[in-house]
Amino acid sequence: FALQTINELNLQNRIPSEAIARFLKDQVMELYNAPNVKGWEGGTSWLTSATYVQRNQVAGWLTTGQKIYNRNQMDKSKDPQLPDLKIPEDLKTNKEVIAFLLDNTLSITTPAIQTDLEEILKYDFMPHAPGSELGILRAYNYIITTPEYQVI
C-alpha cells in the first residue's frame, strides 16, 4: 500500500525512508521482523479498524502533498507540492480518467464506487485543464481508501 501509493504519486524523493519504515511498523509489518518464519498472515487478517483508519490518513496526506515525519505530525508547510500523478494526454472524459485510475490501482469497482467517482469527476470534467489535478487526486484518494482496494 505505502510503496505503491508513493510510486504512483511519484513521491519517491519526497518521503523520508524513516517515515515509510515507521508506517510499516505501525501497520504491524515491520521490515525484517516477521512474527514467525512463515511471515505475516495473508488475506484480511492484518487489516483492523485501527490500521484501516491509519492507512486512510496516510493516503490523505500523500495525495495532498503533505510529508509525513512521524505518526502524529505531518509537514505543516503552507504551500505543499502536489504529487505528480501522470494522466495520459489522450484521456478526454471523466469516465476515461476513472477507468485509467481503476486500472492503474488494480482496484475492484462496484456500481456505488463508479457513481461516487463520477460525482467527484463530473461529466464535463476536463482532465488537462488547469487545476484538474486536484480532482484527479481526490478521485485517486477515494479509490485507495475504499475497503475493496485495501484488501487487494
Image (tube, rainbow, N blue to C red):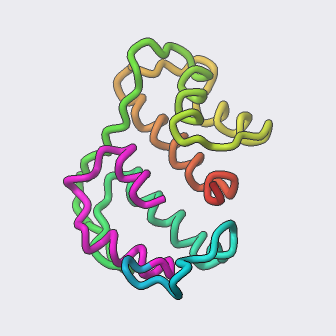
Q: Which residue is more in the foreground, 20 or 98?
A: 20
Q: Is residue 83 placed above or below 125 in the rendered structure?
A: below
Q: Is residue 117 placed above or below 32 in the rendered structure?
A: above
Which residues are the magenta region?
Answer: 1-29
Q: Position of residue 112 (x, y in %)?
A: 78, 41
Q: Which residue is more in the foreground, 2 or 62?
A: 2
Q: Is residue 98 placed above or below 63 in the rendered structure?
A: above
Residue 16 among magenta residues: yes
Residue 49 among magenta residues: no
Residue located at (61% from left, 58% from top): 150
- Looking at the image, residue 10 sits to the left or right of residue 5; the answer is left
Residue located at (35% from left, 78% from top): 22
Name the residue at the front extreme.
37
Q: Position of residue 67 (x, y in %)?
A: 28, 62
- Looking at the image, residue 114 sits to the left or right of residue 101; the answer is right
Q: Is residue 138 placed above or below 119 in the rendered structure?
A: below
Indicate the quadrant containing the C terminus: top left, top right, bottom left or bottom right: bottom right
Q: Position of residue 61 (x, y in %)?
A: 40, 60
Q: Which residue is more in the foreground, 76 or 116?
A: 116
Name the residue at the right extreme.
111
Q: Position of residue 98 (x, y in %)?
A: 58, 29
Count of residue discs: 0
Residue located at (25% from left, 68% from top): 17
Residue located at (32% from left, 52% from top): 65
